[in-house]
C-alpha cells in the first residue's frame, strides 16, 4: 500500500482554494486522511460531486472520472452513512465479507454506482475502528489492514477517504518538520519511512551515547528525556526570583529539540513552550544545551535541582529532594486522612502520592509510596472501611493506561507484614476493558460487599468512552491484597447514555444510585447532561441538566452532601477560568426528584441578620482541581489544579455545618488532573 504510485493528502486541504498538486509520476491511489470522525463522515455527503473534484484537482484534470464502485468499511455499525451513499448513487448496498486479520472479519458495504465497472473506485475506511489493537499504531498493522482492503479494488484507480489518527498525525509532522506547504502530497514510500522511524522512535544522543525515545503511543519511553532526567529549574535574580523549569526536550533531543517551540515559531497562533530554553539542564549555564555541555557536571541525572543565578551569572545549586516525594519507611496512616495521588506538574506526569492527616493536631503533608506507573487524569476510589485504595487507568508516559494499582493501607503500620509483602503499590492482574483517561470512579459498600465503578473516559483520538465496569469483593480480614490480586475481576455494566470525559462521578448518600455530571462528549463540545445509574437494576436514565448555558457549561466536581438535614443531595463545585468578574462562582446544591433541583447553598447566619449569604468558591479562576468529601468529618475538600492558569498546590476544606472555607497546608508538589480521596 505504501508504494510510489500511492499518495496521501490531509483532509484540511480539500477546503482550500489551492487544493491542487503537481504529480511527477502517474498514481493509481489517492488517499485523503481524516483525523476526526466528523470530518470523515462529512466526506460522504454530496460524495459524487466532491469525488470528481478531488480526483481532477490532484490526479487527472483532463478526465472527469465516472465513479464505478463505492465501498464502506467501518468496524462499527454506521447505517446513516451507508444509507446516504446508496441514495447518493441510486443503488443498493451488498455485503462482502473481508478478513482483515486471522480472527476478525468485517462486512463491507459495496455500492455499485456504474454497472460497467471501468470507472473510478471510491473507498471510505474507518481504519481506527478496524484495528485489532486499541489503535493501529504500528507500521506492520497499518500495512496489513490497508493491503487487505485494497484487494477489493486491485490495481484500479482508487480514491480513499481514511480515518486514522496515526496517519493524520504523521502527515502533519512531516509537513511541520520539513517546513512544507500543507497542500503538498506525501507519497507512500515517504510516509512508510516516517512511520518506521516513529515506531522505533530512537534518536542518538551525542552526549552519552544513550538512546532517547520520544513519547509515542504504545511505545516504551524508558529512554525518554522526561524519564531519564529529573526536572530542574532556573531561578534568576533578574526575573524577581521566579522559578522556571528547564525544557528537557530542548536540551537532550539533538535532532528536533522542543517541537512545541518549533511549531509555535512557524505558526504564531499556536501556544509556545513555557519552559526555559536558555539554560543548560546539566550545569545551569547559558549559551549551550545539555548534549553540548563540556562542564564538569557531578550531579546525578536523576536528581532534581534548582539553579539559582545571580546578577553576574554565577550559578548556585540547590537540591530539591524535599520537593520530590520518594517512598518512605512504612508509617502509620491515621484515619481519617486526605490522599492525593499522581497528576500532572508542568509537563510531567507524576507517580508521587502524599497524605494529609485530618486531625486538628497534625496538619502536614507526608509521603506515600510512589505509584508503579506515572498517571494523570486517572481515577481512584477507596471502599469505606476496607483500607484498600484503587488507582486505575489515566494518561501515562506512553499513552493511555488500562492497569489498576492497589495499596493496602493496613500494612502501613506493620514493620513485618505477615504475608511477607512490602507496603507499596501493586498492579492487579486484571485490567480495565480499555485503556483510557479523564474518567471517574466511585465506591459503594452494601451488604458487606465493596464495589468500585469506573465510568466513561477518553480513548485515543476524539472518541469518548461509554464504558462502565465494576470490581466487587467481600469485606473480610482475610481478603487482603494477595487475595484481591488473584480473585478480583472487572465486570461490564450497562454503558452510560452519553459517552463523555472529564466528567464528575458521585454516588448518592444511601448508595443506591451513581450520578455523572457534565463533561466533554468530543474534543470541543461540552454537555450539561446529568445521568443516574440504578445499581440494583443496572439501568441508566437521563435525569437533569446542569443550570448553565449549554455552549458555555463549565466542567464541575460533584460530591455527596453530608451536611445536616440534606436529603440525598450533591454539592457542585464549578471550574472557572478567564473570569474577569470580581465575584467567585457559586457552589450549588443539587437535589434530584425535588421541585427546586438546583439551589445556591445558603451560609448559616450566625449573627441573625436579615442578609442572606450564598456559598462561593474560595478562589476565582480555579480550574482542574479535584474534590472529595468525608462523611465522618462532614467536610468537603478541594485541592490542586490551576489558579489563574498557574499550577497550584493549594487546597481548601469546607465545613458542611458552617459552610465556611478553611485553607489547607500547601501540597509539596503543585499538581493538576490529580485524584483525591478521604480514608475513613
Image (cartoon, rainbow, N blue to C red):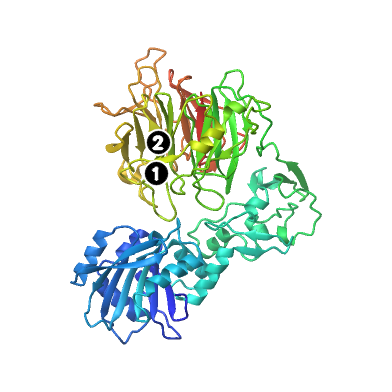
The extreme top residue here reads: 608
Classify 573 as above or below 467. Answer: above
In the image, what residue occupies the spot 34% across and 68% down?
98
Q: Nearer the viewer, residue 138 or 612?
A: 138
Q: In which quarter of the image is residue 422?
A: top right
Q: Distance between the residues labelled 1 and 2?
A: 9 Å
Q: Which of marks 1 and 2 is nearer the N terminus?
A: 1
Q: Are marks 1 and 2 in contact (CB under 8 Å)?
A: yes
Q: From the viewer's perspective, is 486 left or right of 571? A: right
Classify 645 as above or below 590. Answer: below
Label 2 environment density (alpha carbons within 10 Å; few <14, some 14–19, many ≥20): many
Q: In which quarter of the image is residue 582?
A: top left
Q: Which of 336 and 625 is in front in this view?
A: 336
Q: From the viewer's perspective, is 665 left or right of 12? A: right
Question: Residue 45: horizontal and vertical position, in percent?
Answer: 26, 66
* Residue 186 seen in the current view: yes
Report helix, strand or loop for mark 1: loop
Q: From the viewer's perspective, is 84 left or right of 335? A: left
Total numbered circles: 2
Question: Residue 202: horizontal and vertical position, in percent?
Answer: 62, 63
Classify 224 as above or below 535. Answer: below
Q: Quadrant of residue 67?
A: bottom left
Report helix, strand or loop for mark 2: strand
Q: Which of 439 and 523 is in front in this view?
A: 439
Q: From the viewer's perspective, is 5 left or right of 308? A: left
Residue 442: numbered disc:
none
Residue 505: numbered disc:
2
In the image, what residue occupies the spot 64% across and 66% down?
255
Question: Residue 305: horizontal and vertical position, in percent?
Answer: 71, 45
Which quarter of the figure is the N terminus placed in?
bottom left
Residue 456: numbered disc:
1
Question: Residue 41: horizontal and vertical position, in percent?
Answer: 31, 62
Amino acid at each position: 500500500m505504501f508504494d510510489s504510485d500511492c499518495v496521501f493528502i490531509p483532509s484540511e486541504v480539500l477546503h482550500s482554494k489551492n487544493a491542487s498538486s503537481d504529480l511527477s509520476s502517474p498514481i493509481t491511489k489517492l488517499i485523503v486522511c481524516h483525523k476526526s470522525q466528523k470530518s470523515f463522515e462529512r466526506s460522504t455527503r454530496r460524495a459524487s460531486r466532491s469525488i470528481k473534484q478531488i480526483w481532477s484537482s490532484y490526479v487527472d484534470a483532463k478526465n472527469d472520472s465516472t465513479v464505478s464502485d463505492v465501498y464502506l468499511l467501518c468496524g462499527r455499525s454506521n447505517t446513516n452513512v451507508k444509507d446516504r451513499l446508496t441514495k447518493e448513487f441510486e443503488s443498493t448496498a451488498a455485503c462482502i465479507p473481508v478478513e482483515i486479520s486471522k480472527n476478525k472479519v468485517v462486512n463491507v458495504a459495496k455500492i455499485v454506482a456504474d454497472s460497467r465497472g471501468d470507472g473510478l473506485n471510491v473507498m471510505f475506511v474507518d481504519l481506527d475502528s478496524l484495528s485489532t489493537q486499541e489503535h493501529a499504531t504500528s507500521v506492520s498493522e497499518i500495512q496489513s489492514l490497508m493491503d487487505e482492503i485494497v484487494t477489493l479494488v486491485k490495481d484500479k484507480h482508487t480514491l480513499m477517504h481514511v480515518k486514522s489518527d496515526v496517519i493524520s498525525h504523521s502527515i502533519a509532522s512531516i509537513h511541520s518538520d520539513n517546513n512544507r506547504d500543507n497542500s503538498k502530497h506525501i507519497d507512500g514510500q515517504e510516509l512508510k519511512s516516517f512511520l518506521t522511524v516513529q515506531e522505533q522512535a530512537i534518536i542518538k544522543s551525542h552526549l552519552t551515547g544513550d538512546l532517547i525515545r520520544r513519547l509515542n503511543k504504545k511505545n516504551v519511553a524508558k529512554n525518554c528525556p522526561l524519564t531519564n532526567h529529573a526536572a530542574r529549574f532556573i531561578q534568576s535574580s533578574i526575573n524577581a526570583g521566579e522559578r522556571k523549569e528547564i525544557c528537557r526536550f530542548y536540551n537532550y533531543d539533538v535532532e528536533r529539540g522542543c517541537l512545541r517551540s518549533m511549531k509555535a515559531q512557524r505558526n504564531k497562533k499556536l501556544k509556545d513552550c513555557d519552559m526555559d530554553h536558555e539554560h543548560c539542564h546539566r550545569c545551569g549555564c547559558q549559551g549551550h544545551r545539555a548534549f553540548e555541555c563540556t562542564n564538569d557536571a557531578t550531579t546525578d541525572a536523576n536528581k532534581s535541582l534548582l539553579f539559582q543565578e545571580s546578577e553576574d551569572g554565577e550559578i548556585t545549586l540547590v537540591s530539591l529532594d524535599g520537593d520530590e516525594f520518594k517512598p518512605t519507611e512504612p508509617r502509620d496512616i491515621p484515619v481519617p486522612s486526605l490522599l492525593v495521588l499522581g497528576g500532572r506538574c508542568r509537563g510531567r506526569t507524576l507517580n508521587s502520592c502524599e497524605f494529609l492527616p485530618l486531625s486538628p493536631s497534625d496538619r502536614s503533608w507526608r509521603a506515600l509510596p510512589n505509584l508503579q506507573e506515572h498517571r494523570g487524569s486517572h481515577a481512584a476510589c477507596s471502599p469505606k472501611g476496607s483500607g484498600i485504595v484503587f488507582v486505575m487507568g489515566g494518561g501515562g508516559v506512553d499513552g493511555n493506561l488500562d492497569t489498576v494499582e492497589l495499596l493496602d493501607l493496613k500494612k502501613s503500620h506493620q514493620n513485618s507484614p505477615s504475608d511477607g509483602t512490602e507496603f507499596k503499590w501493586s498492579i492487579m492482574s486484571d485490567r480495565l476493558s480499555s485503556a483510557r483517561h479523564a474518567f471517574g470512579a466511585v465506591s459503594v459498600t452494601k451488604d458487606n460487599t465493596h464495589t468500585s465503578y469506573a465510568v466513561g473516559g477518553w480513548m485515543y483520538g476524539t472518541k469518548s468512552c461509554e464504558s462502565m465496569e465494576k470490581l466487587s469483593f467481600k469485606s473480610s480480614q482475610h481478603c487482603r491484597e494477595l487475595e484481591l490480586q488473584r480473585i478480583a475481576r472487572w465486570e461490564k455494566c450497562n454503558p452510560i447514555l452519553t459517552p463523555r470525559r472529564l466528567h464528575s462521578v458521585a454516588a448518592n448518600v444511601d448508595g443506591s444510585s451513581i450520578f455523572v455530571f457534565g463533561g466533554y462528549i468530543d474534543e470541543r463540545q461540552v454537555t450539561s447532561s446529568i445521568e443516574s445509574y440504578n445499581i440494583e437494576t443496572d439501568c441508566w436514565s437521563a435525569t437533569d441538566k446542569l443550570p448553565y448555558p449549554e455552549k458555555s457549561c463549565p466542567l464541575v466536581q460533584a460530591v455527596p452532601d453530608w451536611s445536616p438535614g440534606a436529603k440525598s443531595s450533591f454539592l457542585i463545585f464549578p471550574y472557572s477560568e478567564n473570569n474577569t468578574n470580581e465575584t467567585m462562582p457559586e457552589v450549588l446544591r443539587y437535589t434530584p426528584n425535588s421541585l427546586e433541583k438546583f439551589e445556591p447553598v445558603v451560609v448559616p447566619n450566625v449573627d441573625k441578620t436579615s442578609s442572606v449569604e450564598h456559598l462561593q468558591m474560595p478562589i476565582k479562576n480555579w480550574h482542574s482541581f479535584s474534590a472529595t468529601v468525608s462523611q465522618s468529618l462532614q467536610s468537603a475538600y478541594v485541592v490542586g489544579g490551576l489558579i489563574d492558569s498557574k499550577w497550584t498546590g493549594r487546597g481548601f476544606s469546607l465545613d458542611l455545618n458552617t459552610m465556611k472555607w478553611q485553607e489547607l497546608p500547601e501540597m509539596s508538589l503543585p499538581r493538576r488532573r490529580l485524584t483525591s480521596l478521604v480514608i475513613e
